[in-house]
Image (spheres, coloured by chain):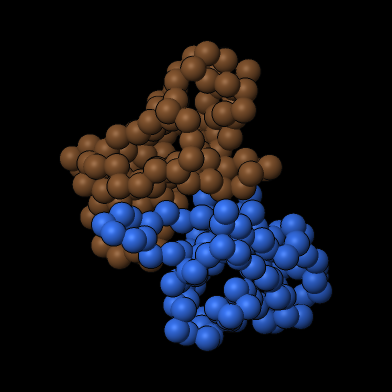
Chain colours: A brown, B blue
Amino acid sequence: KAGVTQTPRYLIKTRGQQVTLSCSPISGHRSVSWYQQTPGQGLQFLFEYFSETQRNKGNFPGRFSGRQFSNSRSEMNVSTLELGDSALYLCASSHGTATYNEQFFGPGTRLTVL
Amino acid sequence: SQKIEQNSEALNIQEGKTATLTCNYTNYSPAYLQWYRQDPGRGPVFLLLIRENEKEKRKERLKVTFDTTLKQSLFHITASQPADSATYLCAPISIPSGAGSYQLTFGKGTKLSVIP
């Protein structure tokens, strides 16, 4: 089975721009979660989608949004980029049928905001 | 507010010794706790899940304990090898009330270096 894939792997943007990141989960997984990882804050939960519906949301501003398509692929959008948005963005998929399901992480997208 | 602390940012041990990593949590009543391994430039990889009614779980050279009274989980790697060098993350999981889902909240991790 192919693992979780994320595109692009690296991205450089400037302040004020917007960005869209993509995540393809493992086949058969219906839950996709997004995380932001920085050296100072560690791994922080952004949101989770299950069957095209946002099921849970972390404490991030409204500039961070996401969606999930019928094939479970997910996108994350960040509008009006700030320098502090520079981070590794990880998505993870799981079966999503139980609260403690193992999460399978992708390699991440490294976003640099200049 | 909920807080997760992993004992130290970095831990160096000699090859062959047992590495012990600590995960403490406050303002939490997790029903489960997961441990992940993360290598530089890669996403975390799931290692073990332990339930609140399990005191101990083993997988090959790995052992995890879960003490809900102390609000602590210990992660042990026996006979450590240089290939075990990585950052290890713990993630306590609380069952949400109502129909809500759960979210994984991770500690900041402990970077383990196993010295040959």
Q: Position of residue A42 (x, y in %)?
A: 62, 47
Horizontally, is B48 left or right of A54 in the view?
right
Q: Is residue B45 visible?
A: yes
Relative to residue A56, is residue A16 depicted above or below?
above
Q: Position of residue A38 (x, y in %)?
A: 62, 40
Foreground residue among B2 and A40: B2
Relative to residue B13, is residue A32 depicted above or below?
above
Horizontally, is A64 left or right of B38 in the view?
left
Foreground residue among B58 and A61: A61
Q: The C terminus of chain A lies in which quarter of the figure?
A: top right
Q: The N terminus of chain A lies in which quarter of the figure?
A: bottom left
Horizontally, is B7 left or right of A9 in the view?
right
Q: Quadrant of residue A70?
A: top left
Q: Residue at x 66, y 61 (%)?
A: B5
Q: Residue at x 72, y 75 (%)?
A: B19
Counting labels gives: 0
Q: Position of residue B31 (x, y in %)?
A: 44, 72
